[in-house]
Image (tube, rainbow, N blue to C red):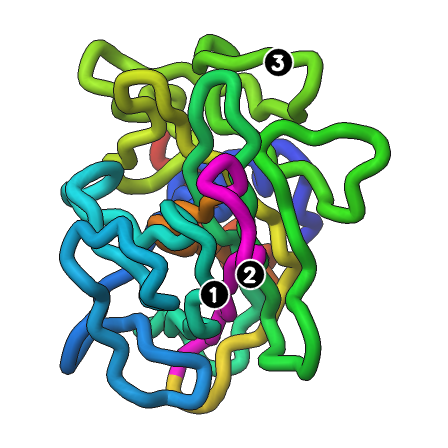
Amino acid sequence: MKISSAMMTIGFAAFGAGAGVTYVDATDGIGGNTTFANGDVFNAVDDSTAADNQWNQRDFANNGSVYSTNEASEDGARLRTVISGLAAGQEYAVYAYFWGASGQLWRGRAGVENTAGDLQGYNTSHFSSSSFMPMDRMTDDAPGDPSLQTNLGLTYDANGLENSGYFTNSVLINEADRYMAQVTLGTLIADANGEIAIYIDDLANTSNGNRTWYDGVGYQLIPTPATLTLLSLAGFGVAQRRR
């Protein structure tokens, strides 16, 4: 049987393959999905703005919790967030999510390997001489100067929740004068346990104008040729039933 592009399209529509990014909120403590990079338990300090070299848990962003550093000059330790429940051996596009604020330049570092030295840096308001790469702001209508940033053309509702279907789950992308920003980290294959690890860090020992607000990570299924064939066959069945 020859599988047409139309049938493949129906298959995708029927099963939602590649339908969107699934956001995973970062959580600390015993049993949380976020630890220090070496695997030790990570416990954030509640709402501290002291120069204590700790990640602070503040009552903002998704699920009322975001991890921040550099409210005062400090160096938070590198973190690791593990995405679990994936299909072992399957390829996924992966992302990290930070926050920015109107008229401010906030930073973050992210990578898929726990390499020596600094992870790649990203900034919320990019400028040409920066060694950091630009983050993708999550809204067109978020505060700030859009000419300095790449945006994804998304919008949010009255509660700040993304409403264009980019995410598979409900995600807060705008809050007061702040907005979520995305870092695209490429594709990874889930390990034998169905897990993928993402590493997060800050710009060490800088001013609060370069603070880091880290919220979570995301993943999106990359269909394999076999998956495409199955989806196409499923779509063919859907089309036949419609007839």
Look at mark 3 in the image and give the residue it sits on. Answer: 146
The structure residue drawn at horizontal position 38% and vertical position 28%, both measured from the top left corner, is: 165
Look at mark 2 in the image and give the residue it sits on. Answer: 204
* Quadrant into which the N terminus falls: bottom right
Look at mark 1 in the image and give the residue it sits on. Answer: 75
Q: Is residue 181 inside the magenta stretch?
A: no
Please name the amino acid that badge 2 sits on: Ala
Q: Quick check: 189 above or below 96?
A: below
Q: Position of residue 210 (x, y in %)?
A: 53, 41
Badge 2 density bin: few <14, some 14–19, many ≥20, Cα 10 Å? some
Q: Secondary structure at mark 2?
A: loop
Q: Which residues are magenta?
A: 194-210
Q: Quick check: 120 above or below 6?
A: below
* Sequence-wise first label, 3 or 1: 1
Please name the amino acid that badge 1 sits on: Asp
The answer to whether residue 239 is seen in the rendering is: no
